[in-house]
Amino acid sequence: MTMDDIAAFPGAIREIIQVSSRSSASHFRVAIDHPESSIWWDALQLHHSPFKRHALMLPLFGTINEYRATCLVLLYALSILVRYRPSLWRQIQEGELDHFRSLIETFLSAVERILPEQFLEKITGQSISVHQPGSFFS
């Protein structure tokens, strides 16, 4: 990532400075304005899910930075592909485009786990904690 990439993230990010690192990865230090909130991370639109607790995500479609909306658009696009382009879908499933299959299956398995819980939390306004019976957290 570059400084321009970090500046493109939504939120009150400013004063982006590259800092040295022991690894080959790029590391940056930023300042975040948060006059309305007492904690700096409340000023950012963080994504929360069972797979990744806190993540700052760059919007895929311009200014739409709502994760649920992006997932619904991608699910709708996949449904159109399956229904109206069956030959292309067959190539993805078992043909020359099968390298996309693992990406789609990973996306679908994550979405079927995350979206219902997130929509329920948004609708009810309460935090929902869902665990499989017999797990460490039940």
Image: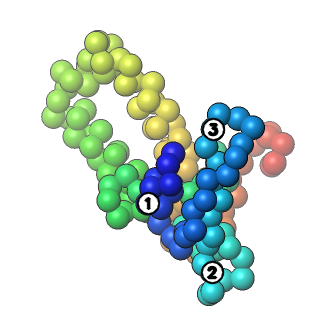
Q: Position of residue 20 (x, y in %)?
A: 70, 46
Q: Position of residue 38 (x, y in %)?
A: 72, 82
At x 55% / y 70%, what residue is drawn? 14
Q: Amino acid at mark 1?
A: Ala
Toward the viewer: 4 or 94? Answer: 4
Q: Is residue 68 left or right of residue 22?
A: left
At x 39% / y 24%, what residue is drawn? 101
Residue 46 visible: no
Circle 2: is it few (<14), some (14-19), or many (20+) Cα within 10 Å?
A: some
Q: Amino acid at mark 3?
A: Ala
At x 57% / y 68%, what residue is drawn? 15
Q: Is residue 68 left or right of residue 33?
A: left
Q: Position of residue 106 (x, y in %)?
A: 49, 32
Identify the residue under disc 3: 25
Q: Position of residue 61 (x, y in %)?
A: 32, 55
- Dot placed on the residue nearer the N-terminal end, 3 or 1: 1
In the rendered image, the residue lying farthest to the right is 136
Q: Is residue 98 left or right of residue 68?
A: left
Identify the residue under disc 1: 8
Identify the residue under disc 2: 34
In the rendered image, the residue lying farthest to the top is 95
Of the residues tagged 2 and 3, which is closer to the observer? 3
Circle 1: is it few (<14), some (14-19), or many (20+) Cα within 10 Å?
A: few
